[in-house]
Amino acid sequence: MNELPLKERMKINRHPMPAQLPEERTANFNEVNIGYSLQIAQKEAQRCLQCKNAPCTAGCPVNVHIPQFLTHIIEGNLLAAADVILNDNFLPAICGRVCPQETLCESVCVLAKKGKPVAIGNLERFTADSTTHLRSEREMEGIANPTGKKVALVGSGPSSLACAGDLARFGHSVTIFEALHAFGGVLAFGIPEFRLPKSIVNYEIDVLRRLGVRFEKNIVIGGTLTLNELMNGEGYDAVFIGAGAGLPYFLGIPGEELVGIYSANELLTRINLMKAYKKESETPVLSYQEKVVAVFGAGNTALDSARTAVRMGAKKVFIIYRRSEAEMPARKEEVAHAKEEGVEFLFLASPLEFIGNEEGWLTSVKLQRMELGEPDESGRRRPHPIEDSEFSMRIEMAVIAIGNGTNPLLRNTPELEFTKRGTLKVNQGTLETTKQGVFAGGDIVTGGATVISAMGAGRKAAQSIHAYLSESEPNEKNPRS
Amino acid sequence: MDQNYLTLPDKEIQQFIKNVKSFILVPVKIMFEIKDKKKIAPDIYRLEVYAPLVAKKFLAGQFIVLRPLETSERIPLTVMRADVENGTIRLVVKAIGLSTKQLCGLNIGDTVADLLGPLGQPSEIDTFGTVVIVGGGVGSAVSFAVAESLRNAGNRVISIIGARNKDFMILEDDFRAISDELYVMTDDGSYGKKGFVTKQLIDLYEQGRTLDRVITAGPIPMMRIISDITHEHKTPTIVSLNPIMIDGIGMCGGCRALVGGKIVFVCVDGPEFDAHQVDFDSLIRRNNAYRNIEIEKEHACRLDAHIEENVKNE
């Protein structure tokens, strides 16, 4: 229980996240944030007013019982705090780091009215990090008896991981299929080490392994095996598609084939998945040393790319965005970190053409000034080009980080229906696709979104799959039945 | 906890496998074992790699991405043929970069760390009439698979294969078996006819032959010249592109090329494209982007001696 009177609680200032100093961290790829100590965590948790209606819980896509876990932190019962979170969120160490808390739980915190919400994300991270050993040591509990039903999960990103955890606890036999050689999807190839250490991703995957989830790499569904083969040949009773949105958009302007232009996915894959930032890595990455770099886009991926370029030794890194800072979709913390690291922001400018030299290497970009008009369907003010405002900028490297479309590999699957945007059509209530027994969630359904919303969809699909399997007979091709 | 189905001494499962021939037990840790390895020319190796799921699915024109070692880059490689019964795929590899040297440094019984496929769109196989297959160097391997399929589809197949000299001539017997006509070319005339493969193609046109389709794979400069020649004669021409790739599943866009003025992803949209639409210049530049970095990395790791040693031991 929080003994502190309400008035006293409100006198405590929000505790900033201790972090590596900017000049230190730009020379390494280690995690920027260092994390709360127990003392800071307890002090921060005391700020919670324990609102009866818990708006924070309602603001969380997976409805973590936030006031409850904060109380356990105050009492020093960290494992109990972790269990409260784990009840709704299997990946607390990851979500504590990559969730956009300022637009979710923290945005509706009563203290947010005065601009200082409880640092829920930091406390979630603390709870997860400080209980890793305790959590690994104990027996896995709450696993139902085997049902004899098999479920295949396509992709090993956040939606599949969350889905797998629930399905395994329901007693189903779960296999995750991954095309790449490492598991975690965007958590492995997309989000850089300095924001999400890969050891954390591997820890969470081990938790699932201990729950009995099988992980198969080097298998691309739609290529190596088809959905129908999984269900008819391999005896899977149900399938969850969590293949994500991994097909990078390009700007569609002249010169995009020039050398020196990467999609954010390519830069981040080379750096994160293939470890090209390490000297001993055999995967090359074009040199950023002493180069002028422009990153197009303003989401987390754009900031990850810009900050990666800083760490690769770039002389100057610009984020170029056609709207203004207020419309940036990135997490506020990342924007602040990027500024501290010397990333410069060029707002209200849009690229028209990339110019290269005779060898086909990028040398400059032609840009156009923009102004903001009326809000569009996304609620953000729509940018309009200003006439005769073209200007050029000398750049040597560019990164395109303007979002991703959905992967095309499953589009030829009979019975699956896709929208014009290329996302999978699903029943919004059950997340079942147009093909019986096949469910989907995450970015492949919504288009590019967040880790937590993908996880939420994975868990929702797990419920539907469980309900579906409880009604159906085991697949007769299933060798276990 | 990580159970392996095959180790379960469950008689029913074993019986089940026997009964359902098409059944492949997926949760098997597939070891991509090198079943056979042969040096077929200086620096060029023919490998048979165990990859039953890939072998079963492979269609002419498709490719795989592999990592020879846990530390290696991911590299795309074309598949020459698949042996469904033995579950193997045949790769023809020139040990030219660090990763291909690592791959060719592996021995029979060794395993490849990772292998993903089949990837890309299969070649369009139809009855076109007379098709000419032009293969240069290890590019002959990918065009072989396409040639074989086209022959089976009832086309008259004319194959033109070329090499620097006699020592580098590969796959001649393979092509002879599936071609109605075969022209073997060497640059120096040490074997077959003297001249480039392009010369033979021009000869065919000069003889007044009707060519309904040309398919080519090999070095980019060769593909470009062939494309120019066939463009003049308005012969539909397909090239198989081999750009730098990482994931092979459309995720990074590193393999993008300009085709018809538009950006395409070779890994998922290709690898085959209408030759007359391809911007070969940008393709060459993009493929050379890492040359300096690679040379540095290779210097750090002297693999050539290692490969030679392995071959002698066989």
Image (spheres, coloured by chain):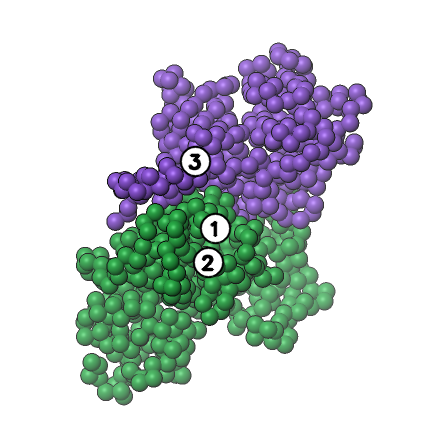
Chain colours: A green, B purple
- Tag 1: residue type? Leu
Q: Tell me which corner region of the image, top left, top right, bottom left or bottom right, holds residue B195.
A: top right
Spatial CA span between label 2 and label 1: 9 Å
Label 1 element class: helix
User: Is B260 drawn above or below residue B135 in the view shown?
Assistant: below
Name the residue at 33% across, 66% down.
A89
**Residue A199 falls left or right of residue B188:** left
Q: Nearer the viewer, residue B35 or A47?
A: B35
Dividing the picture into quadrants, the one containing residue A100 is: bottom left
- Residue at numbered disc 3: B52
Q: Secondary structure at mark 3?
A: helix
Residue A438 tag number: 2
Residue B70 on image: x %, y %? 37, 38
Residues marked 2 and 1 touching at CB (< 8 Å): yes
Rendered view: A247 above or below B166: below
**Residue A331 placed where, x, y %?**
44, 67
Residue at x 31%, y 75% (from the top left corner): A66
| Residue located beneath label 1 in the image | A227
Q: Kindly report the distance in space between the C-alpha atoms of the residues bearing marks 3 and 2.
A: 26 Å
Front-lying residue, A392 or B148: B148
Identified by mark 3, the residue type is Pro
Residue located 22% across and 84% down the image: A4
Q: Mark 2 packing: few (<14 Cα in 10 Å), some, or many (20+)?
A: many
Residue at the spot 28% in from the left edge and 53% down from the top edge: A212
